[in-house]
C-alpha cells in the first residue's frame, strides 16, 4: 500500500526531489501557505516547526519530514515504524 505523497491530492505532483517542489505540492494539496521561519524564531500559536531532509542523489532518492515538538526535541516517523525522537 502506497502512502499519499505531496501533490497527490491536487494532482500537482511535480518532481518531489527538491525542497521547493515538496513545499509547492503541500501548499497546493491543502490550500495553505507554509511560513518559513528560522531555527530560533518564535512560532505562532498552534504551529510546529518542520524540517525537510532530502536525499536526491544516488540510487535510493527519498525525503523525510522532522517535526520540532513542544519540548524542542525533533521527531520523525519512517513508514510503519515507531516514532523516533532526537535532541536538538
Image (cartoon, rainbow, N blue to C red):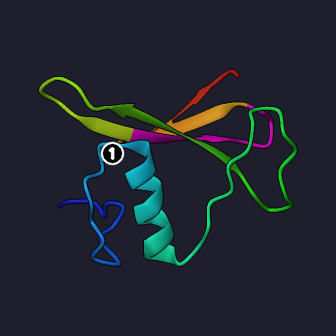
Quarter where residue 17 is shown: top left
14 in relation to 55, above or below: below
66 in relation to 22, above or below: above
Report the residue that reaches farthest toward the left. 59
Report the residue that reaches farthest toward the front. 20
Query: Would you say residue 46 sits in the magenta stretch?
Result: no
The image position of residue 52, as x and y in percent, is 49, 40
Q: Which residue is mark 1?
A: 79
In the image, 24 versus 54, the foreground residue is: 24
At 73% from the left and 44% from the top, the residue drawn is: 37
In the picture, measured across the screen, residue 2 lies left or right of residue 5, that is: left
Disc 1 crowd, CA 10 A, few/some/many (<14, 14-19, 20+): few
Give the residues drawn in magenta, as a range: 64-72
As helix, strand or loop, the secondary structure at mark 1 comes to: loop
Q: How many marks?
A: 1
The image position of residue 26, as x and y in percent, is 46, 64
Query: Would you say residue 71 sits in the magenta stretch?
Result: yes
In the image, 2 versus 7, the foreground residue is: 7
In the picture, measured across the screen, residue 28 lies left or right of residue 34, that is: left
At 70% from the left and 22% from the top, the residue drawn is: 88
Quarter where residue 34 is shown: bottom right
At 33% from the left and 67% from the top, the residue drawn is: 7
The quadrant of the image that shows the N terminus is bottom left
At 43% from the left and 44% from the top, the residue drawn is: 19
The image position of residue 2, as x and y in percent, is 20, 60
Quarter where residue 40 is shown: top right
The image position of residue 36, as x and y in percent, is 67, 49
Amino acid at each position: 500500500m502506497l502512502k499519499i505523497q505531496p501533490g497527490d491530492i491536487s494532482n500537482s505532483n511535480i518532481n518531489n526531489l527538491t525542497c521547493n517542489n515538496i513545499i509547492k505540492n503541500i501548499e497546493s494539496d491543502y490550500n495553505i501557505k507554509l511560513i518559513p521561519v528560522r531555527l530560533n524564531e518564535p512560532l505562532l500559536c498552534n504551529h510546529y516547526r518542520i524540517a525537510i531532509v532530502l536525499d536526491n542523489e544516488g540510487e535510493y532518492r527519498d525525503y523525510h519530514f522532522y517535526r520540532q515538538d513542544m519540548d524542542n526535541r525533533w521527531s520523525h516517523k519512517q513508514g510503519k515504524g515507531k516514532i523516533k525522537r532526537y535532541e536538538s
